[in-house]
Image (tube, coloured by chain):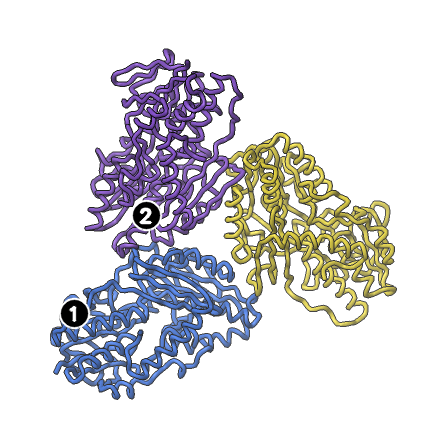
Chain colours: A blue, B yellow, C purple
């Protein structure tokens, strides 16, 4: 009986654990380690920040679901991986594995920009539930005494979507409240142009997004790095100072400390086309932890985003590869990963499809319309329902 | 009985005088001073230049209208204001006032660019009736021997609309006459980009206007200052020389000499939210004479336009404030001023709405279509009818 | 009986010969000299390169057609023109003329860029039938082992259309074959911007083409000159190196050696409004051989394209002028030349109309749609049918 350990309880970890258990049944002993005992539908975190969702609307307790499926759940943080001895360490345990799936998500590198982030710094963030709830409090306070909002992405960011959504949502909510004229919104990004998204743009995303920002009267500052953030002021490397009443910035990401020694200098881990770690045959890596080379060098450094959709796809391939290893059935095909992404725009939304993710692409779509807003809401409900029923995500 | 003096017989002065007389009746003695004895519908002056209107189509004699309403009309130029003694001087009179409304329009600063303007210079202008009629003669002569047209706005301009209209109208009229291919049209402006309009742009006005100029094959030179104009040639500060057969340029504006000592170095007068002069409680200022800070510093200096629509709104607030002072009724609300503007484009037209005028804005609209051309014509007739009947403008 | 000699058997030469014979009949002795014994419908050469046409689909033998019309056909290359003695020399003959029409097309100046061209260089071309057939072989080989495609126009090019068509067709064909994601496409051009076409753009052609390239994920490098081409690599003057698996570049054009001594340093011959050579009254020049000044100096040198449509128009005017000389009937009107052009875009097509060709223009159109693809195919068949029946082209 194979011992399989999965680190991470979000898109990648749950998908992998469900798939492995579904296909291997009694042939495998599947253990999932996570420091958070809930699944959080991360794409909805901006809506928490806006007050459009409560925590309970977008979270599911992991324990009952995993146990019902016969998956062992260890609610502890992974502290380290010993690849030579095939062991994962947590605070209180050492767990032996035959196969390991690393789906640990990001370490948020607030420390790379002085004054960045909600804990030691002066900006909000919406990448964890706690941050989003904190951002919602800041937002409610801001509404009583509005002023300039500065939002965007600092140098080295790979996950560009949430600040876009945040800017559009702020704009829409303020118009709804008839307060938009009291709030200059400034969007600062390390992307070489609006609509680059870390993937070299998507069809005419530059045009569409520049037009959208113009229409919404959101000022853009592109191709820029942030020097530091002091209370109430963003200071760019080029000397520009932008005072603010409210600020939300995406930080750069790194691999989390427990696994970063396996990877490149930023702690992202190199894999082959089946998400198998290039150095150890029994370790697989999916999601943010994977090293993906950017499609082009940008003047200010940027990275390639790894969305939930991509992570689920990776997790399925990794799980299926382990199943093939163990059972001898055919290996899954190696396809360059594609992506479908729904970007909220407050009063509307956009759908993006890219196949593969990075150019040149066989297919690429970018369309906006209120129908995609409904689709986004529908998908949130659908995905949470799937997780609650122990089914791996995506149709 | 309060003595109220209004200087200016155009949008602001007439609106204020009509409102004051309508609301105060016998409680006030309203005097209107103007060096011109006609109301001229200034927005139609480009059509005079094109030969699409005659002077009589867009002018109304002031005397009979004002007298019928019981407003005293002094057809003389104001020569000075003594704010300490509350007196206005004209050529032959000294008029004491309890309240003064300054609605004097602009002094056209042709002297700031050598060779600019129709009198001492070599370019046409369409900001006064005389200029527009002169420009029409130049146009008719040009049609017999066509060549390059250079039009636009020099440094320091705040009223950017008329050169846009002129360029579009020239283009349309030449196509109608099957002569467009004989006339290169060059549009030169101090705006940082086409569609800036001195108000930092309006939604995607940059895109729409750049596209429109491209479609019409009108060459654009933006972000530029004019060094001098010699007969048949515009010389830019960067050394570019553009020969022309016909040229129309908007000049910068200043406060008129009679009141400029009350204002900033350019003679524009600072006011509070009710258009009350910040230094003297019994003086109000509306329209071009008001000092409005630009929303952003542009590389080449530009100013904020003050349209007829804005002036009427200001005049109503100023008049209502005086009424409140005198009668004790509630003061009018202070709202940041909005604007609605219809820009003629020759064969079509565009409507622009901005609320407030300067960004950030709660609402902003920019649409073009032939329906707005009809709307513009309709509004011209409607407004002139209102003035003829002694009603203050706008619904 | 007037002896008229026409050099060239393509759009210009055939049109002129047919027109002269039709109108003058027995009054003229018309001789056509061409080194190629077929009419080739040049606009379809990109389709040869793509494998969408075979040579026999787009060629017509000249001899039977010309002889049936009573036109003498000399299948030899013109070696020289002695304008003083009114003689054309070929390999074996000296032919006396009363009137000469030069419609010789271009000399392709591959030698101006080291490594350019299919014979002595490392890039394909699609300007002759042989080149297009060679390019088709290279394309078929490429499909077995795809990689980067670099295509475009080097400095000095005047005929920009075919590389646009080639880039769009490559993109469309690769999508059809589900291989697009394996092929980065880079478009390199000396035009100051995409959509300039050597004619200063056409309405909003810049916007439309930039958008189209973005949508198709074709990378653009504009305003650039090529330093040299080595096997598998394009080297730009600015130091950029672009490796490729397949490359197709348009070369600059010059007048062909046999007539270039009559023209400017590039061998293009100056003419009056009737295409009569400015130095000799009995010589006419049409098509690529004509000198046309560019509408504006571009940072990297570019020329004005002369399309088949334009050449046919020129040839008709030149022929009619000779007819007037001989018969005394009224001379044809001199109109600045217009152009209609159908650009293939692989899965769709665009129609462009410009009247006149160079700005400012009375009329300009740019529309795309699949209907123009059908129109382009229909026109190919129609024109070939006309040539086969000895009728001069265009309705």
Marks counted in the figure total 2
The secondary element bearing badge 1 is classed as loop
Q: Chain of mark 2?
A: C
The secondary element bearing badge 2 is classed as helix
Left or right of B184 on screen, residue A6: left
In which quarter of the view is residue B11 placed? Answer: bottom right
User: Residue A49, position in %: x, y?
Assistant: 44, 75
Left or right of A158 on screen, residue B262: right
Left or right of A258 on screen, residue B67: right
User: Residue C170, position in %: x, y?
Assistant: 30, 48
In which quarter of the view is residue C47 placed? Answer: top left
Q: Chain of mark 1?
A: A
Disc 1 designates what residue? A331
- Residue placed most toward the observer, B75 or C16: C16
The quarter of the picture where the N terminus of chain B appears is: bottom right
- Residue placed most toward the observer, C68 or C318: C68
Disc 2 designates what residue? C169
In this rendering, the label closer to the viewer, 2 or 1: 2
User: Residue B301, position in %: x, y?
Assistant: 57, 48
Residue at 43%, 61% (x, y): give it: A188
Q: Residue furthest top?
A: C85
Identify the disc placed on residue C23: none
Is residue B156 shown above or below C74?
below
Q: Is residue B263 visible?
A: no
User: Residue A226, position in %: x, y?
Assistant: 39, 61
Residue at 19%, 50% (x, y): give it: C144
Q: Is residue C169 visible?
A: yes
Residue density around tag 1, few if under 14, some if 14–19, many if 20 or more, within 10 Å: some
Distance from Cα at disc 2 to Cα at disc 1? 36 Å
- Do the residues under discs 2 and 1 have CB atoms within 8 angstroms? no
């Amino acid at each position: 009986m194979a011992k399989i350990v999965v680190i991470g309880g979000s898109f990648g970890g749950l998908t992998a654990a469900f798939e492995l258990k579904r296909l291997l049944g009694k042939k495998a002993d599947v253990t999932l380690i996570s420091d958070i005992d809930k699944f959080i539908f991360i794409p909805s975190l901006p809506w928490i920040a806006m007050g459009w969702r409560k925590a309970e609307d977008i979270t599911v307790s992991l324990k009952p679901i995993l146990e019902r499926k016969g998956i062992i759940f260890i609610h502890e943080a992974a502290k380290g991986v010993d690849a030579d001895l095939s062991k994962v360490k947590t605070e209180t345990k050492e767990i032996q594995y035959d196969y390991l799936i690393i789906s640990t998500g990001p370490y948020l590198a607030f420390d790379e920009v002085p004054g960045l982030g909600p804990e030691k710094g002066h900006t909000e963030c919406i990448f964890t539930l706690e941050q989003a709830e904190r951002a919602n409090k800041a937002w409610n306070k801001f509404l009583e005494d509005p002023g300039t909002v500065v939002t965007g992405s600092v140098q080295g960011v790979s996950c560009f979507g949430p600040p876009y959504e945040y800017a559009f949502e702020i704009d829409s909510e303020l118009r709804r409240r008839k307060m938009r004229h009291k709030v200059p919104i400034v969007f600062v990004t390390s992307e070489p142009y609006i609509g680059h998204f870390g993937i070299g743009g998507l069809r005419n995303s530059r045009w569409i997004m520049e037009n959208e920002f113009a229409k919404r009267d959101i000022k853009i500052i592109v191709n820029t790095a942030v020097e530091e953030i002091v209370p109430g002021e963003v200071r760019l490397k080029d000397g520009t100072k932008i005072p603010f009443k409210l600020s939300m910035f995406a930080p750069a990401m790194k691999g989390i400390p427990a696994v970063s020694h396996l990877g490149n200098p930023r702690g992202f881990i190199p894999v082959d086309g089946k998400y198998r770690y290039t150095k150890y045959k029994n370790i697989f890596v999916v999601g943010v932890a994977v090293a993906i080379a950017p499609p082009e060098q940008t003047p200010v450094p940027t990275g390639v985003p790894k969305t939930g959709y991509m992570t689920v796809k990776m997790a399925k391939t990794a799980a299926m590869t382990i199943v093939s290893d163990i059972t001898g059935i055919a290996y899954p095909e190696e396809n360059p990963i594609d992506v479908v992404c729904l970007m909220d725009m407050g009063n509307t939304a956009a759908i993006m499809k890219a196949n593969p993710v990075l150019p040149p692409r066989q297919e690429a779509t970018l369309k906006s319309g209120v129908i995609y807003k409904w689709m986004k809401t529908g998908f949130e409900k659908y995905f949470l329902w799937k997780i609650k029923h122990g089914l791996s995500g995506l149709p």
